[in-house]
């Protein structure tokens, strides 16, 4: 494997594959539980690749997926370029401090058939051996609010 690019060192705590469970809520849908898998990988370039997929906790049917790139800026700032098969593209900026990444959207774009999402906030943080993930979303004409939270354990 390639050597980690020096600018990516602050994100090294995320590298690897993680699996766990989460819950989701939003006023326009029924509450739900899910199984989640994420991976953070690198190829020696100044970015970390991210891939995520979820399944219904009861049926095992696919729910959501997304992929993108974390782009550390070398001064504690980080960007995330993220795409979803639902037709949503998120551009987020934020900070990485210790083992905590906090991001807020600067732009959310959608295809003509995508549901209207106007803003997102994301947080990734590790406590002990647990990766926590949370997402807030403004969608369907509603204000920014909590949407999903999960806890995952490192597989590799």
Image (cartoon, grey):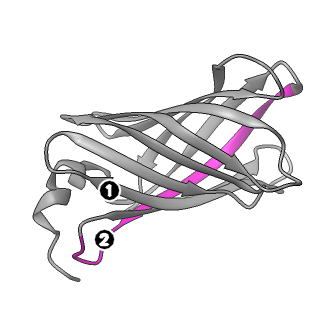
Label 1 sits on residue: 71
Helix, strand or loop at label 2? It is: loop
Magenta-span inclusion, residue 2: no
Mark 1 surroundings: few (<14), some (14-19) or many (≥20) residues within 10 A: many
Residue beneath the point at 24% across and 51% down: 11
Q: Which residues are drawn in magenta? A: 30-45
Q: Position of residue 74 (x, y in %)?
A: 15, 50
Residue 33 - label: none
Q: x%, y% of residue 65?
A: 67, 57
Q: Is residue 51 visible?
A: no
Q: Secondary structure at mark 1?
A: strand
Residue furthest to the left in view is 6
Nearest to the eye among marks 2 and 1: give it.
Answer: 1
Q: Position of residue 153 (x, y in %)?
A: 43, 46
Please tell me whether the stretch drawn in magenta is mainly helix, strand or loop: strand
Using the numbered discs, state the Cα–Cα distance from disc 2 to disc 1 in whole angstroms.
11 Å
First reached walking from the N terminus: tag 2 or tag 1: 2
Drawn side of residue 17 relative to residue 15, left or right:
right
- Quarter of the image with the C terminus is bottom left
Furthest residue in direction bottom, as rendered: 1
Q: Residue at (84%, 42%) from the top-left corner?
A: 115
Q: Which residue is mark 2?
A: 42
Q: Look at the picture and state if 32 lies above or below 66.
A: above
Q: Quadrant of residue 100?
A: top left
State the image quarter where residue 113 is shown.
bottom right
């Amino acid at each position: 494997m390639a050597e980690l690019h020096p600018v990516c060192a602050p994100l090294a705590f995320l590298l690897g594959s993680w699996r766990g469970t989460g819950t989701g809520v939003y006023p326009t849908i029924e509450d739900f539980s899910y199984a989640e898998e994420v991976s953070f990988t690198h190829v020696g370039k100044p970015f970390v690749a991210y891939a995520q997929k979820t399944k219904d906790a009861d049926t095992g049917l696919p729910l959501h997926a997304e992929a993108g790139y974390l782009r550390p800026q070398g001064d504690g700032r980080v960007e995330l370029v993220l795409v979803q098969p639902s037709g949503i593209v998120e551009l987020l900026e934020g900070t990485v401090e210790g083992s905590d990444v906090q991001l807020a959207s600067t732009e959310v774009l959608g295809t003509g058939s995508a549901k209207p999402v106007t803003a997102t906030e994301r947080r990734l943080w590790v406590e002990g051996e647990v990766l926590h993930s949370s997402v807030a979303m403004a969608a369907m004409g509603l204000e920014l609010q909590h949407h999903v939270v999960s806890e995952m354990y490192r597989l590799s």
